Image: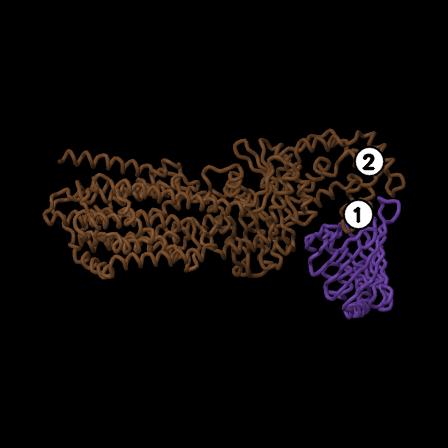
Chain colours: A purple, B brown
Amino acid sequence: MTLRLTSLCFAVLASVAAHASADDLDDVMHALAGRRHGEVSFVERQFLSLLKKPLESSGELLYDAPDRLEKRTLEPHPESLLLSGNVLTVERGRHSHVLELQSYPQVLPFIESIRGTLAGDRTALERVFRLQFSGNLARWTLVLVPLDAEAAKAVAEVRIEGAKDDLLQVEIRQTDGDRSLMTLHAPVGQ
Amino acid sequence: MRARRARIIAPWLIGVAAAAWIVAHANYVTDLSAFLPAKPTPLQKQLIDQLRDGPASRLILIALEDGDAHARAHMSLGMAQRLRGDTEFSTVDNGEPVSARRDRDFLFQHRYLLSDAVTAQRFSAPGLRAAIEATIENLASSSGLMLKSLVPQDPTGEMLHLIDELARTQGPRTQNGVWVSADGARTLLVVQTAAAGSDTDAQERALNAISTAFRASVTAAGSAGSAVQLRMSGPGVFAVAARAKIKRAVTRLSIVSSVLVIGVLLSVYRSIAALILGLLPVATGALFGIAAVALAFGAVHGITLGFGITLIGESVDYSIYFFIQSLRRDAQGTASGSWQRLLWPTIRLGMLTSVCGFASLLPSGFPGLAQLGLYSISGLVAAALVTRFVLPVLLPHGLKVRDVTPLGVWIGRRRDSLRRFGGVAVAGAACALAIIALSVLYQHRATLWNRELSTLSPVSLQDQRYDATLRSDLGAANVLDLVIVTGPSLEAVLGGAERAKVPLQSLIDSGVIGEFDSPANYLPSLATQQSRRSALPERHVLQERLRTALAGLDLEADQLSPFVNDVEAARHGALIAVEDLQGTSLSSGFGALILQQSGHWSALLPLHAVTGAAAPDIDIARVSAALAAAHLQDTQVLDLKAQTDALYASYLHEAIRLSLCGFALIVLLLLFALRSPLRVARVLAPLVLAVLAVAAGLAACGQELTILHLVGMLLIVAVGSNYALFFDNEGTQQRDEASPLTLASLGIANLSTVIAFGLLSFSQVPVLAALGETVAPGAFLALVFSAVMTSRAPPSAAPADTADA
């Protein structure tokens, strides 16, 4: 009985907390959705247990509402990842691969997390992730946990930090302890 | 008398029975091979192998259209599952990763034998360092996630290299887990039949199995499935449709023309007995014709049976001449047997003229023509012999046929009204017509002959376009352009395919071709596998080199002990054999590119055009030049369309040459029989004029002439020579006028010929239509021209007996 009461209390408290931050989440989503186009440079560091030092790559991210995201890596090797609708096009050197995102659930969290957040499309995000929000519009953190079992095998969570409608940092934690940390900067002149 | 009857009828009946038995047991083929050479050159042989049995011939492209995309995807999965359980099909692909796991295991296990990057240099200390550095850099890329777990076992990145190589020839776009067209409007499946494409029965079974699977999946999909449409394309689909079309056309045309001809004969003879007797030469001729083809060629092409209708047209003439002329003479009290004496020599000469014409087709390398030649010769000889020997003994006493003299008189008047203009006017008009016809032909000389085999194809242009659409949807290699390597063993052709890789890669680099497939990508030759295996260093050597290679890199040597173990295992492992491919999708890919026929192997390397290129056609001449420059033995580029068209053009040239030979033969025969160049000229002039007029008419109507039009012209001469010889005979022998009865019998014979061929010209099958539209007007013109030009009273007609002909 006591146990049931306690759990009930927790449940109520949890729902209140969720409700409180849900408003802030909606504010953030609303702000993000208002942005139709975005262009930032990124630096990505990958911390792999395999390697003694983190791997670093850099390039730019381009976003066009509602569903086009391009990750253009410039260093150390040029590569382009273009997600448009459900189709992912990878270009490296002479090679070009066209993939359908749904066919690669393990790849999905890496890219859908960023695009869904940039689009401010909460419904779309909630189809793929469990959302945990903290902070407020001025400075916020959104943690995305993949719902799909196949995706969850590779990715433990995606942690996105932002201020208003800007994304500052995207951290992807893999289940094996490896992680990548992508820092975003508005390019000079914007 | 009775004994004489038995002596004639018994051999005839035995012959008919034997021919019927042969016809009933003959092998009938309906594939494309009627249009392929009988004695091919080695390159042509490969071409035929390709068209008949090659992977391209076994491909069926399936599209699901309309309805909802999700429903279509679901139906694609259902159909594929059903078809995979059917032994009619060797592969069923719809984009599902059914064997992805097994494929990955196979590639990973054999990566050191499969990867063309494995060389002694790569396993030296500097080589290892370069490969590992590249792998570390790749870790930062989009494939890093997949690569990461592989690094301890595969730090040189062989697996990634293999996947990249195999993915170079990428399939179509995937949506909802299955293949769709680029615009998503069609859901696509590709199946390969187990049987060869030339096995039309098996192809038909396969098509039925696909339709059944489709209906089952429509039912399973419920209301969402009802809007979805099934469409199929590919060589097998075309072959089955063409067979059905030819069968329908031949059956319908035979029935309709038989009914019409019988109607004409019945209204002329007014006697059922005469009608039945009159059809005996036709039926005997048809039976003997098919039997002769079956005996000489081993198999009868379906299209040859289609040409059989042409035989009705000519052989029925014999009995018409027989009945009308001999029976009327009898009635007039002429001695019995006068027909044999007076008219048979003329019919015999006409028949021999036709035989000469058709004999010219016998040496043709085009089996369809050679069969037509033999069929016509044996059929005409049989029909003429039955008319000459069997009909007289079967003739019941007192058989009466209608008096057609009034018809003959009517025809005579029409002719006389034309001839009233006088000999000079007729000659002048004939010359003018010949000049007009020749000038029309000269104007159209560039487009006079059609040189594409596809014009003979019963497949409609619309269906051919849809086929091209599906192929481009699938991004499938253009199966019409291949590099082909031949040799005495699998090892030899795989080695040849590997050597061809160097020039082909340089063609990719220079943008001549987009990509190419090769069976050696799935299974390298044993020699190559051996050299790769021997490039792998011993365990302690590898460990030593790794230590050197990793100095200064961010990777620890002890992380890579799985790599050292795998290399050691590969050094002592067996080489890959064909059987090892079993159960992987590589197996079907490999099987499609290797052909084996009686100890003779071929490796096929299909060429892909550059994607998004302005001109989708591959410049075959440059591919050919590159291969020649590389001095590769037994390696050739095969441009199927150009080759088949070249082949067809060579047939056309050959057929034109043979027809001219046939014409020369006819001239010689007539010179020998008539013993007068003037008479020969008078007999042939109307026929030549009729041929010219028809050819000019067709050209003026924008019709490009095909090999079948040429055969039609030969038939005009064959049929028309009977008319001209009759007029010639009557003119020289009795009076300067052909008798009304001769005119009537010629008119009726001509009517039946025009009916039979006129019907053909309405056929949907191009080869039959071409024959019809040439012979129907040609036969009519030949009669008119002969009547006007040949039967003029000779200037000094010394009564000559032509019976010695």
Chain of the residue on which disc 1 is drawn: B
Label 1, label 2: how far apart the Cα atoms are? 21 Å
Q: Which residue is mark 2?
A: B561
Q: Which residue is mark 1?
A: B138
Look at 63% across and 39% down and name the residue there: B628
Residue B259 shows in the view: no
Residue B356 shows in the view: yes
Look at 58% across and 33% down and name the residue there: B487
Discs 1 and 2 lie in a common subunit: yes
Residue A49 to residue A182: above or below: above
- Choose mark 1 or mark 2, whichever is in front: 1
Q: Position of residue B53 (x, y in %)?
A: 51, 41
Look at 19% across and 34% down and name the residue there: B7
Chain of the residue on which disc 2 is drawn: B
**Left or right: residue A24 compared with residue B603:** right
Q: Position of residue B664 (x, y in %)?
A: 35, 43
Residue placed most toward the observer, A8 or B619: B619
Instruction: Say which quarter of the image contains residue B112.
Output: top right
Identify residue type, mark 1.
Asn
Q: Say if mark 1 contacts mark 2, CB within 8 Å.
A: no
**Left or right: residue B503 compared with residue B134:** left
Residue B585 to residue B73: above or below: above
Mark positioned earlier in the residue sequence (1 or 2): 1
* Crowding at mark 2 (Cα within 10 Å: few <14, some 14-19, many 20+): some
**Left or right: residue B142 compared with residue B366:** right
Q: Position of residue B17 (x, y in %)?
A: 27, 37
**Left or right: residue B786 compared with residue B191:** left
* Image quadrant where one finds the C terminus of chain B: top left
Q: Position of residue B337 (x, y in %)?
A: 15, 42
* Crowding at mark 1 (Cα within 10 Å: few <14, some 14-19, many 20+): some
